[in-house]
C-alpha cells in the first residue's frame, strides 16, 4: 500500500473505520448514510472516511464521565 504524502489527508475504508469504532462495516456505512459520519466518495463511488475525524470520534467516545467520589455513573454503594 502506498504511503500518503504529508499534505495528503488520509482516509479510511469502511472496514478500517469499523475496526477503530468497534462496530461492523455495515454500521459505518449506515451511519454515513444517516449523516452521522463524515465521508468523501472516490471516483469509483466508494465512501472513504477521514482518519483524523474518525480517531477524534473514537477519543471522544472513550472518555467516560466520572460520578461523585470517583465512581462511574450508575454504580451503587452498599
Image (cartoon, rainbow, N blue to C red):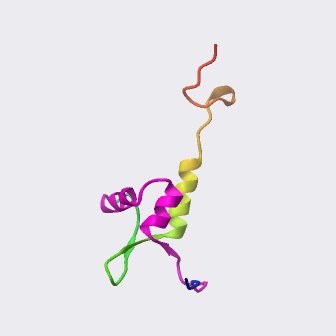
Q: Does the magenta stretch include residue 17?
A: yes
Quadrant in which residue 29 is drawn: bottom left
State left or right for residue 47 relative to residue 5: left
Quadrant in which residue 6 is drawn: bottom right
Q: Nearer the viewer, residue 17 or 75?
A: 17
Q: Does the magenta stretch include residue 32?
A: yes
- Hey, which residue is sitting farthest top in the picture? 78
Q: How many marks?
A: 0
Tell me where residue 40 appears, x and y as whole percent: 38, 74
Above or below residue 29? Residue 77 is above
The N terminus, quarter of image: bottom right
Tell me where residue 47 appears, x and y as whole percent: 37, 72
The residue positioned 56% from the left and 85% from the top of the image is 2
Q: Nearer the viewer, residue 20 or 55?
A: 20
Above or below residue 72? Residue 5 is below
Above or below residue 14? Residue 64 is above
Above or below residue 75? Residue 24 is below
The residue positioned 37% from the left and 57% from the top of the image is 36
The residue positioned 50% from the left and 56% from the top of the image is 21
Bounds of the magenta segment: 5-34
The residue positioned 65% from the left and 29% from the top of the image is 71
Tell me where residue 58 appears, x and y as whole percent: 54, 55
- Hey, which residue is sitting farthest right in the picture? 69
The C terminus, quarter of image: top right
Tell me where residue 52 appears, x and y as whole percent: 54, 68
Amino acid at each position: 500500500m502506498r504511503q500518503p504524502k504529508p499534505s495528503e489527508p488520509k482516509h479510511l475504508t469502511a472496514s478500517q473505520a469499523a475496526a477503530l469504532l468497534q462496530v461492523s462495516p455495515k454500521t459505518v456505512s449506515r451511519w454515513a448514510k444517516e449523516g452521522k459520519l463524515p465521508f468523501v466518495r472516490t471516483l469509483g463511488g466508494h465512501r472513504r472516511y477521514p482518519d483524523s475525524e474518525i480517531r477524534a470520534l473514537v477519543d471522544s467516545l472513550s472518555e467516560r464521565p466520572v460520578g461523585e467520589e470517583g465512581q462511574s455513573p450508575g454504580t451503587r454503594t452498599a
